[in-house]
Structure formats: structure tokens, C-alpha cells
């Protein structure tokens, strides 16, 4: 095992997340009740996804600057773990919706399906899905790396408009909608309870580092496989 | 085996740390009752076990990968 401090840090932070996340006091709110604790899990998946996609974007640019094939492998695997986090975020959100918006807030299924953030997140994930389809359709390694790196830049450029900007412009059931009193819980530090921030930020770092760990394993496997390929020829 | 022992120790430590829970009637319903029974710790223990299991698995894959890398 490659011993790294950040792998241990990830473990410590996630153990802290679970213990503090379940046991510390949280704001007592109607409808949300104890499900407010999902902030440490559901929201962290999306934050982790954004960081992993950002890393993938960085390696795609790096690939285009020097055409080092290793950077393409890095970009691909960070994007794939990012997509995994996105899918997990979607799935956990589905469970959360079914007990808060649909049953307690009395939202119809129609209004939930029209939720701009759900649509935006789906668009973003599908754009990343197309990234893998695009990659898979090339037989030439260099062409694949080059075109998918360019596409990855486009995909990242679409990520923030679709999951942040548009939902906040048109109004959404998620916090941060225009006209609601939820303010801007993602960026304004007055809009999230300080006791929750104490768990939330470490949780984001912990989950992200776990994602990075899994990505590095995939990268090492792929680098190894390609090295073998070169040796065999 | 050590994982089990570890979770049990956590359970014990957490049970000792937390003691008081207030009851209020006009406030939104929270899982106070569950916590007063100490049963929330069961959930924490379950989640910790899963987390530790996941980390052990990733660690083993990492170790295996390193071994393969070294051999070649």
C-alpha cells in the first residue's frame, strides 16, 4: 500500500463525520427533522463530485498542453469516480425527497419532477455520460485522448450553470431559491448553522479524499495495464 | 475481530460521554427518544462498521496493486 497521510486523514474525517454527524445537536426544523443530517452525506456527494470533476478538468487541460498520455488516464478516472459520486448523490436525494418534499411538504410528484436542480443535475451527469460514450467510440488512442480532453472541458463548463446557476435563477425546492429565506447556504457562512458547518466541511474533505483514493487505484491499474501492453509489443 | 472490538469500544466511550437529553413539547419532533434509549449508537456503530469495512477493502486493493506494481 502506498502510505499517504491523506488516506489516513480521509478515514479519520469520515469516522468523525459519522460519530459527530449522528450525535451532535442539529437545528430543530419542521419537515426536515433529523433528516437535516443528510447534509453530511447527500450534499457531500455533490461537493465531492464537483471537486473530482474539477480535477478531471485540470488533467484534461494538462493533457492538451503536453499530450502526455498519463494525463488522459488521470482525467478519465477522476471523471468516472466523480460520476459515481453524482449517481450516489442522486440516489440519496431520491430517498430524501420521498420523506420530506413529497410526504411532508405535500409537493406533488409533478412539482418534484419539475425541480430545476434535479433536471440540471441530470443534464450534468448525462453530459459526463456522453464523455464516456465518446471515449469508447475511438479505436485510436491519441485521437481518443485528444478529443475527449476537449469534450471534458466543455462538460465541466456546463456543470456549474446546470447545477448551480440555472436552479438559482428560476427557483427551486432546494435551499438558495430566489425569494426563499434559506439564503445561500453553500457559500454564505451566515446561512448555515455553525454547529453543522463544523461537521459539514470535514465531511466534504473526507468523502472527497475517499473518492481520490479510489480514483488513484483505478489510475494505477490502468497505468500498469498500459505498461504491460507496451512491454508485450 | 479487531473491527468488532473497535466498534464496541466506540459504543462504550460514546455511551459514557453523552448523558442528558431534554424533553420539550413545543419543539419539532426529533429523535430524542431514540437517543435517550441509547439506540442511536446502534446506528452509529453500524455505519462505522460499514465505513471501516469499506476502508479495509480499499486498503487491501491498494496493497495488492502495490505488490503487482513491485513485481513488474
Image (cartoon, coloured by chain):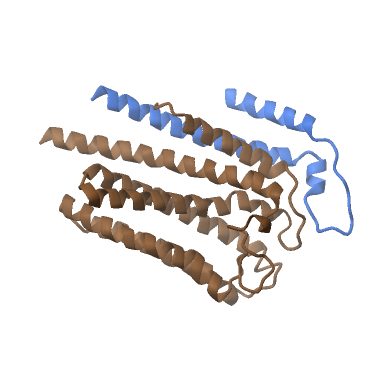
Residue drawn 25% across and 42% down? A70
Residue A1 higher or lower than A15, as above or below: above
Residue B53 higher or lower than A72, as above or below: above
Residue drawn 13% across and 34% down? A232
Answer with the quarter of the image where residue A203 lies: top right
Which is nearer the eye, B8 or A210?
A210
Shown in brown, the chain is A
Answer with the quarter of the image where residue A109 lies: bottom right
Check the picture and name the quadrant holding the N terminus of chain A: top left
Residue A127 higher or lower than A231, as above or below: below
Which is nearer the eye, A227 or A157?
A157
Rendering coords of residue A12 (x, y %) = 57, 33
Rendering coords of residue A225 (x, y %) = 24, 37
Number of marks in the rendered image: 0
Rendering coords of residue A135 (x, y %) = 25, 56
In the drawing, does residue A168 fall left or right of residue A70? right
Check the picture and name the quadrant holding the C terminus of chain A: top left
Question: Which residue is at the far left?
Answer: A233
Residue drawn 69% across and 44% down? A22
In the drawing, does residue A17 fall left or right of residue A29? left
Shown in blue, the chain is B
| Residue A18 appears in the figure | yes
Residue drawn 81% across and 40% down? B37
| Residue B53 appears in the figure | no
In the drawing, does residue A47 fall left or right of residue A134? right
Rendering coords of residue A61 (x, y %) = 29, 52
In the drawing, does residue A96 fall left or right of residue A224? right
Amino acid at each position: 500500500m502506498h502510505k499517504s497521510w491523506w488516506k489516513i486523514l480521509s478515514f479519520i474525517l469520515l469516522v468523525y463525520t459519522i460519530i459527530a454527524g449522528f450525535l451532535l445537536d442539529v437545528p430543530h426544523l419542521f419537515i426536515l427533522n433529523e433528516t437535516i443530517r443528510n447534509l453530511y452525506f447527500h450534499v457531500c456527494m455533490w461537493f465531492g463530485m464537483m471537486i473530482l470533476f474539477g480535477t478531471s478538468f485540470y488533467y484534461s487541460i494538462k493533457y492538451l498542453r503536453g499530450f502526455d498520455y498519463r494525463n488522459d488516464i488521470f482525467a478519465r478516472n477522476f471523471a468516472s469516480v466523480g460520476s459515481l459520486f453524482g449517481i450516489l448523490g442522486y440516489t440519496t436525494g431520491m430517498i430524501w425527497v420521498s420523506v420530506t418534499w413529497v410526504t411532508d411538504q405535500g409537493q406533488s410528484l409533478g412539482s418534484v419532477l419539475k425541480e430545476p436542480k434535479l433536471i440540471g443535475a441530470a443534464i450534468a451527469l448525462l453530459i459526463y455520460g456522453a464523455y464516456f460514450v465518446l471515449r469508447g467510440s475511438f479505436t485510436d488512442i491519441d485521437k481518443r485522448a485528444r478529443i475527449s480532453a476537449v469534450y471534458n472541458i466543455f462538460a465541466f463548463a456546463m456543470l456549474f450553470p446546470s447545477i448551480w446557476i440555472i436552479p438559482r435563477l428560476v427557483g427551486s425546492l432546494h435551499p438558495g431559491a430566489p425569494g426563499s429565506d434559506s439564503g445561500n447556504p453553500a457559500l454564505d457562512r451566515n446561512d448555515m448553522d455553525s454547529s453543522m458547518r463544523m461537521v459539514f466541511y470535514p465531511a466534504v474533505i473526507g468523502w472527497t479524499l475517499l473518492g481520490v483514493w479510489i480514483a488513484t487505484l483505478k489510475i494505477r491499474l490502468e497505468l500498469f495495464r498500459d505498461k504491460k501492453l507496451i512491454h508485450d509489443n | 475481530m479487531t473491527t468488532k472490538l473497535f466498534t464496541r469500544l466506540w459504543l462504550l466511550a460514546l455511551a459514557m460521554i453523552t448523558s442528558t437529553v431534554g424533553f420539550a413539547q413545543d419543539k419539532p419532533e426529533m429523535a430524542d427518544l431514540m437517543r435517550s434509549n441509547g439506540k442511536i449508537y446502534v446506528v452509529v456503530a453500524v455505519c462505522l462498521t460499514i465505513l471501516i469495512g469499506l476502508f479495509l477493502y480499499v486498503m487491501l486493493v491498494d496493497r495488492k496493486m502495490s505488490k503487482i506494481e513491485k513485481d513488474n
